[in-house]
């Protein structure tokens, strides 16, 4: 935000804010107030569609409270907590609250995304927009998610899981969806009018289509959950759009700041309304379903949908071009934050910390948080607040806690069998990533171009980093190994067994194609340990290895079976990193240890290495080893606190290594994490936190979920 303002005029922009005419402020405030009321009305109607008879005044109060709370911290997380503060007395489940927020976000993203697409085509041309969409792999991601979930549903979905989707897609709900779309379009029209009118006042020469197109693009960028209240993203996008018109970017930034301030002013003006809106805290009647007792209750459906979205979209990283740089987001991040809000609200309502299968998990999480904040303060004192430290690590930890919370949502939705169902979904979506990538590369080698596919020379899925992709595959492989005995109980001639073995073989094939040496070595050691101890079914290990080897041989040594090798090159098998890459990483780690000697006990501080490395290497670098990174930036004190905080949990895992399947799987993923972390920084990898939380989550004693398999079928013995 500060960089955008400085680049287009600095203090002069801020001084011009006080010179704006009164009628402009009045129009903006009226449009933004109308938008606020429409959002509250949509929230009220969505709850009514779910069967909750909520008074309008209470819905308005909850919506306003959520918007005000969103100003204070991470917007999506705080919005749900703010709404629940009003609705908890009425008996609304936090899972329903969070799922409604996700529903609203998706609907808004679709509506504003369509307008932004049309506006961008009008402003920049269809070719430029298509190139952008192809770089984001939108069509491929949709294909992979649908294919992956379809595979998992075929051999793991229960009848009640199918009934959920049948019930959600009936005619009545389609009409309700159209109603929500209509309300969202009206609210979005208010925001477009707000931006268009503001742009018109500073650029009266622009025609109406240009104003609407510019407003559509800027409004969509501001609505993306990648900033605090749209600040910075909104101003940067507006400046870029005005620059394309040949107009002063300072005028666009001025209007954007003014709209942001007016939006906050409307919310502040609504604060007195919260005390005036007096509602009776009576329980909410829930249509024809029970709040927690059946598999198709709103609470369970909401928890299941949120968890499902995280499981399906964790494999996808989006790199969004933005004026001044590229923003890196994972498509599952917003849903993970909503999962965190559910767990936080449940802990508040039950006045107890989340329950876990192993002792000391909450202590370990607290240790990680305290040590990270301490390192942040040290770094702040050394070099000030940096984007890498604040956004990438401090706020990044909040997102990771969201992934860690998903396991609790799955247990709320379907009980203990949800772990096995999540294992199937991750396995299927990961396999779908590999299948689609291989198929597209093979077709491209035969001269068939579809979905605007431009392959990378590395096999890296949709993460644009083959080591991160390999680590994701490694964790899923370890998870499936831990649960292999579940499927071994069924007949090995059964199609479900064969499907699991084949998909596991595909994951191993993708790991080989990535040529990530650390992850490949870790996978080999994991499978050896799982075979010897034994932590996994040996026939499962042997079958998956056979599938992997035969598939790899077919591609590498018998290419004529799959494609015309004379027609063109194909990028399936990545090349191993050369000596230069290895030497560079050793230099990064050596510099880190050199800096550590300056402050061995407290560490140099979070983000200090990233900032100071640019003076040595010409650009900012990161340490490629988790233990070294912790030692350098957290110091000996931080490292010892982390060890002490996690020790009880580690002892519990070692004590139960031969116990239930979740313990076995957790031991395997922990072993994989420890091995790979020596050569790469993987502490902030989302998949690790997601799988770990899935395996460690346990029911709180106060939770009233009595059926453990209403949603998920048991595997036939």
Image (spheres, rainbow, N blue to C red):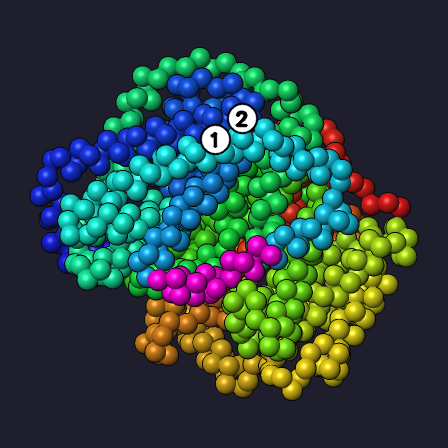
Q: Which residues are magenta?
A: 125-143
Q: Nearer the viewer, residue 83 or 316?
A: 316
**Which numbered tag is attached to residue 49?**
2
Q: Quadrant of residue 52?
A: top right
Question: Can residue 682 be seen at all in this image of the molecule?
Answer: no
Asked if marks 1 and 2 touch (Cβ < 8 Å), the reply is yes
What residue sits right under mark 1 in the picture? 179
Is 278 displayed left or right of 318 in the figure?
Answer: left
Q: Quadrant of residue 560?
A: bottom right
Q: What residue is shown at x 38% (from left), y 48% (from top)? A: 115
Overall secondary structure of the magenta stretch? Answer: helix
Circle 1 residues within 10 Å: few <14, some 14–19, many ≥20? some
Q: Quadrant of the N terminus?
A: bottom left
Q: Is residue 207 above or below residue 47?
A: below
Horizontal and vertical percent position of residue 65? 37, 29
Is 245 displayed left or right of 278 in the figure?
Answer: left
Is 119 displayed left or right of 427 in the figure?
Answer: left
Q: What residue is shown at x 57% (from left), y 71% (from top)? A: 449
């Amino acid at each position: 935000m500060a960089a955008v303002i400085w680049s287009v005029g600095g203090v002069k922009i801020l001084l011009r804010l006080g010179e704006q005419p009164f009628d402009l402020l009045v129009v903006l405030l009226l449009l933004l107030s109308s938008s606020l009321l429409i959002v509250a009305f949509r929230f009220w109607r969505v709850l009514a569609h779910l069967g909750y008879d909520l008074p309008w005044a209470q819905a308005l109060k909850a919506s306003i409270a959520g918007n005000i709370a969103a100003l204070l911290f991470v917007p999506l997380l705080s919005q749900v907590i703010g709404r629940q503060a009003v609705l908890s007395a009425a008996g609304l489940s936090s899972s329903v609250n969070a799922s409604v927020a996700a529903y609203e976000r998706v609907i808004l993203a679709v509506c504003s995304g369509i307008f932004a697409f049309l506006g961008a085509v009008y402003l920049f041309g269809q070719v430029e927009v298509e190139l952008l969409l192809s770089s984001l792999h939108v069509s491929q991601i949709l294909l992979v998610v649908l294919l992956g979930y379809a595979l998992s549903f075929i051999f793991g979905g229960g009848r009640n899981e199918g009934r959920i989707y049948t019930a959600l897609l009936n005619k009545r709900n389609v009409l309700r969806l159209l109603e929500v779309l209509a309300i969202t379009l009206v609210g979005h029209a208010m925001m477009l009018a707000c931006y268009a009118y503001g742009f018109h006042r500073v650029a009266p020469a622009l025609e109406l289509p240009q104003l609407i197109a510019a407003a559509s693009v800027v409004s969509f960028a501001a609505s993306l959950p990648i900033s605090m209240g749209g600040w910075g993203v909104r101003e940067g996008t507006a400046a870029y759009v005005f620059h394309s018109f040949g107009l002063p970017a300072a005028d666009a930034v001025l209007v954007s700041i003014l709209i942001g301030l007016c939006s906050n002013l409307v919310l502040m003006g609504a604060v007195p309304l919260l005390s005036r809106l007096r509602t009776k805290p009576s329980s909410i009647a829930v249509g024809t379903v029970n709040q927690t007792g059946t598999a198709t209750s709103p609470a369970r459906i909401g928890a299941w949908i949120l968890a499902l979205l995280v499981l399906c979209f964790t494999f996808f990283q989006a790199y969004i071009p933005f004026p001044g740089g590229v923003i890196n987001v994972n498509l599952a991040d917003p849903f993970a934050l909503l999962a965190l809000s559910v767990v936080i609200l449940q802990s508040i309502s039950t006045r107890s910390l989340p329950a876990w299968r192993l002792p000391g998990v909450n202590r370990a999480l607290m240790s990680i948080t305290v040590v990270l904040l301490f390192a942040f303060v040290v770094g702040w004192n050394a070099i000030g607040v940096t984007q890498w430290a604040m956004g990438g690590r401090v706020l990044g930890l909040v997102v990771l806690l969201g992934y860690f919370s998903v396991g609790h949502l799955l247990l709320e939705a379907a009980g203990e069998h949800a772990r096995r169902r999540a294992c199937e979904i991750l396995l299927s979506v990961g396999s779908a990533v590999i299948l689609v990538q291989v198929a597209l590369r093979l077709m491209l080698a035969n001269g068939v171009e579809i979905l605007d596919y431009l392959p990378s020379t590395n096999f890296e899925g949709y993460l644009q980093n083959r080591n991160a992709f390999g680590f994701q595959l490694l964790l899923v492989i370890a998870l499936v190994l831990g649960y292999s005995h579940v499927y071994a109980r069924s007949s090995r001639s059964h199609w479900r067994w064969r499907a699991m073995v084949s998909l596991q073989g595909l994951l191993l094939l993708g790991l080989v194609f990535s040529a990530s040496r650390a992850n490949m070595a870790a996978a080999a050691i994991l499978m050896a340990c799982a075979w010897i101890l034994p932590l996994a079914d040996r026939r499962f290990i042997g079958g998956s290895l056979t599938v992997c080897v035969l598939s790899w041989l077919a591609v590498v040594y018998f290419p004529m079976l799959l494609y015309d090798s004379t027609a063109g090159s194909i990028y399936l098998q990545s090349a191993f990193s050369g000596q230069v890459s290895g030497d560079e990483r050793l230099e990064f780690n050596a510099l880190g240890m050199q800096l550590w000697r300056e402050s061995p006990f407290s560490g140099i501080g979070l983000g200090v290495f990233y900032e100071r490395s640019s003076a040595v290497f010409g650009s900012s670098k990161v340490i490629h080893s988790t233990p070294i990174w912790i030692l350098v930036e957290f110091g000996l004190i931080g490292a010892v606190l982390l060890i002490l905080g996690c020790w009880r949990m580690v002892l519990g895992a070692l004590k139960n290594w031969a116990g239930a399947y979740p313990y076995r799987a957790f031991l395997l993923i922990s072993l994989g994490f420890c091995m790979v972390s020596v050569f790469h920084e993987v502490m902030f990898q989302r998949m690790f936190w997601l799988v770990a939380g899935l395996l460690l989550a346990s029911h709180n004693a106060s939770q009233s979920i009595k059926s453990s398999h209403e949603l998920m079928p048991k595997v036939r013995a």
